[in-house]
Image (spheres, coloured by chain):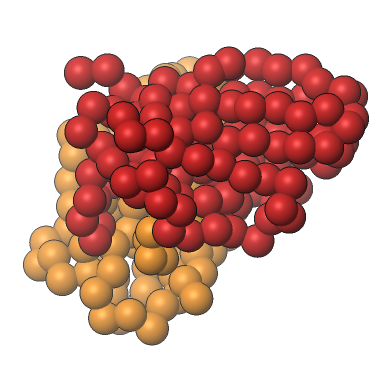
Amino acid sequence: AQKITQTQPGMFVQEKEAVTLDCTYDTSDQSYGLFWYKQPSSGEMIFLIYQGSYDEQNATEGRYSLNFQKARKSANLVISASQLGDSAMYFCAMREGNKLVFGAGTILRVKS
Amino acid sequence: KAGVTQTPRYLIKTRGQQVTLSCSPISGHRSVSWYQQTPGQGLQFLFEYFSETQRNKGNFPGRFSGRQFSNSRSEMNVSTLELGDSALYLCASRKTGANTEAFFGQGTRLTVV
């Protein structure tokens, strides 16, 4: 079974600075995909970025990028130039069959 | 393009009652999944439907059930509600494909009193 570990319950970052949210995973599959979602206080889960295990380059989407280290089984999310609107819960997830397995999440607070 | 729509947004029910939640996926998405989110257990998979067939079910009691209609809309039902069923219920839809991203609705927040 897949397992996702997010070891940072909460993080603070100063506005305009970069922040890294950690995610490690465990899987015996050779082909897999990792997802990051943002959940603001409204509750909706917003898809941010996807990394495939065979992708040769780290994924990037605007201010979001993934620091993917396959040998270490880590897929850390980097948010550059943090904004106040980035304050939310962030989840790392992996697909297991037809379902997503989520980590416990990291609460990010951006300070002005 | 409309996103995933869940109704209602909020519900308050009494123990022992039953409840039905609705989810309309993004047009063209045939896979619909349901998740329960609680502070104690985090996000847990309930079930997944594709073309009106349940393909996967999570580790939940039989009081939790669901179905999918021919237009891909899905409903989930919880019977004989318990206090512990209070949670945010999230629905997600996606296209077929091994690692396509899932798009979530805003959720239905159920409170059982």
Image height check: is A54 above or below B68? below
Residue extending farthest front: B70
**What residue is rendered at 59% in x and 27% in y?**
B21
Residue extending farthest left: A56
Image quadrant holding the C terminus of chain B, namely top right
Going by the image, does B87 lie left or right of A20? right
Residue B2 placement: quadrant: top left
Q: Is residue A108 visible?
A: no
Image quadrant holding the N terminus of chain B, namely top left
Going by the image, does B85 lie left or right of A36? right
Residue A75 placement: quadrant: bottom left
The number of callouts visible is 0
Image height check: is B7 above or below A25? above
Q: B87 or A7, which is in the foreground? A: B87
**Percent of width and height locating residue B10:** 65, 16
**Percent of width and height locating residue B63:** 74, 46
**What residue is rendered at 41% in x and 66% in y?**
A96
Going by the image, does A92 lie left or right of A65? right
Going by the image, does B108 lie left or right of A90? right
**Percent of width and height locating residue B56:** 48, 60
Q: B98 or B60, which is in the foreground? A: B60
**What residue is rendered at 76% in x and 37% in y?**
B79
Q: A48 or B67, which is in the foreground? A: B67
Q: Is residue A84 visible?
A: yes
**Percent of width and height locating residue B80:** 83, 37
Specify the colour of chain B.
red
Image height check: is A31 above or below A91? below
Specify the colour of chain A.
orange
